[in-house]
Image (cartoon, helix red, strand yellow):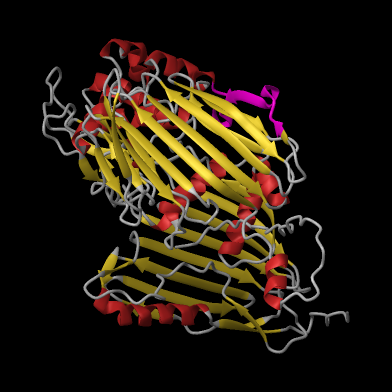
Amino acid sequence: MILFSSWAAFARTPQEKPKETPQEKPAETPPAKALEKTEEPPNAAQIELLETKYRFETNGDSRKEVHAVVKINSELGVRQFARLNFDYNRGFQSVEIPLARITHANGGTSDILPSAITDAPNPAVEKYPAYHDVRVKSVRILGLQPGDSLEYRVITTTIKPPLAPDFWLDHSFDRSGVASKQLLELDVPKSRKIQLHVNAMIPSAATTDSETEKDTRRVYTWNISQKFDTPAEASESDIVMTTFVSWDALAVALRKMLVPSKSTWSAVSEKASELAGNQPTPEKQVRAIYNFVSQKIPTVDLPLGATGFRIRALGEILTSGYANAEDKFALFLGMINGFEADAFPAFTGQAKEFSTSLPTPAVLSELLVIAGIPPKPSPGVGCGDCLTFVWLDPAVEVAPFRAIPASLRGREALSDISGGGRGGPSITRVPNDLPFPSTQNVGIAASLATDGTLKTKVKYALRGDNELLLRVTFHKAPTDKQREIAQYLSLSDGFRGKVTRVKTSDPYDTEEPFEVEYELTQEKFVDWAKKPVRIPALLPLPGLPDLTKKPAANSKIELGTPLEITLTGTLRLPPGTLATAPAGTSVKRDYATFTSTYSSKANVVNFSRHLNFLLPEIPSDRSLDLTAFIHAVQSDQSQLFVLDKPESVPPAKPK
């Protein structure tokens, strides 16, 4: 595939040495001691104590208290802790910060004043008043210096949460070494049946039972002072607790939250009829409504569950003209229902497989839609259970109908597709297929001037995963940033030079391939003083499967979604220039084919490459054959044209 990349540069700020108390210099300092005194702290800030306490009630209410003591070691640490932010939803939560205190290295303490605490809508919802309950409480830590210690305490209280009386917890300990001592306390009522999973790497908890006036409670306590060998991102959550008895129960509970009341459907029926009433088939009716919900209702980019899975009234969603993923599902369902279609939420997570873990909403991160489309029935005749199911992602505003991002395809999904817990599957899988063949057509029109300057026009026409990537990128980018995006695109495809113009097709026109055109200029592309002059074919470099790792026996080698890449181009040379073209290549396998042709006539050079991946995977025992295929493609890409400078070209000026 043609690669499109972006880079992020990370600058490491030098850490300041800790201040030392003046003392009498010893007569001799052993080298080891000298090294110990001048050694810089390993972290910009060291969390000396991180204490977290959870208390859950039988009705689902909860209280979370975090107490931390942080030693600031450098200016970078000062910047990291200059502001503390705590996310919450004021619809059912409150946040208090009873303590924020600095203990100065030179003695004395200072408490942070209440005036330094602010409470404002999450930046993601500032322009969307309906979601202003999603908030951030912040405290500015003024006067912090290297060598100081910061101590703070924050309490989050949850009352009548949307999924009550069920509750859950997903907690991981710091594994980076930033936290020296970590304490976790989990306080639950013994009357509630909970499922608890503890990572095998975590020491056993101390358990105590106690009696209160209201109930009997059990408290689990973990005291962690060790440093883990496994980084957090490479391991499962350390502590998982849930009262959901099964994934089926969770699927039913989530669907119940997201399905709007039938009494509210009438508020959107008129708009639905306007959009789809004249469409000839049920699929085109559903498609028309999908296009409206995905494209005309901007997506408010909130984490899944930030609103507690609560949905707004359908009429309010339609009138406001914006929605988060949950509200988009509700609006879509309410609008298609008048056409005997149905829809079901499908939740995916960061992990490709999550069904082997305990059922908790914490592992779910994306919401897709499974739409049930009826066949075209006779007038007035219902369809019953003969729906055809298609997967949709209306939260991606420019995703074509039935196109799911590659990062989500093939993953497990949680969906009460039976519509009410009537025995339908709760764990299903996102389809791997796209609704259309994946193609990439790239056309190049270039000209080389007598002074060695190359001017190139590049045009992409894309269908498939890279299409969706570029649609989203250009859709979200301001106009003044699109040339910068085209510059990254040209670099990722092996082109050099400065992009001078860029143009795209309408990202909302999802019925057609997405097109990107740009022009770039590269000075001193050739130096005519060199003999002979050799240049490559001016074509993008298609990505090839990575064979750096030897596949395991009886496994599969992933080739990705079947993709057809067609690259063609012409280069117009200065009058009188002669060019010698390399020989073309043809390699054919049952899983992929590659052909290339190169030619030169008069002062025009023509080149083309065609690469077609036919299968998504092959057995591991064919790795040597795949290696040979890839080497053949790479060898062809390294071939060069030889140019003979015409007499009319003036010699290069001396530097």
User: Residue, x 72% and y 72% (percent of image)?
Assistant: 34
Residue ranking furthest to the right: 654
| Left or right, 259 with reference to 577 | left
Residue 172 seen by the camera: no
Toward the viewer: 370 or 268? 370
In x, y percent, where is residue 331?
Answer: 36, 23
In the picture, which quadrant includes the C terminus? bottom right
Vertical arrangement, residue 538 with respect to residue 41, above or below? below
What is the span of residues highlighted in magenta in the rendered image?
110-128
Toward the viewer: 258 or 161? 161
Toward the viewer: 242 or 149? 149
In the picture, which quadrant includes the N terminus? bottom left
Toward the viewer: 67 or 114? 67
Q: Quadrant of residue 418?
A: top left
Instruction: Count up the numbered dots.
Output: 0
In x, y percent, where is residue 485?
Answer: 61, 51
Say if the magenta span includes residue 122. yes
Vertical arrangement, residue 165 with respect to residue 179, above or below? above
| Left or right, 261 with reference to 12 | left
Say if the magenta span includes residue 515. no
In x, y percent, where is residue 558?
Answer: 32, 66
User: Residue, x 60% and y 61% (percent of image)?
Assistant: 490
In x, y percent, where is residue 223?
Answer: 42, 47
Residue 421 seen by the camera: yes
| Left or right, 506 with reference to 595 | right
Residue ranking furthest to the bottom: 531
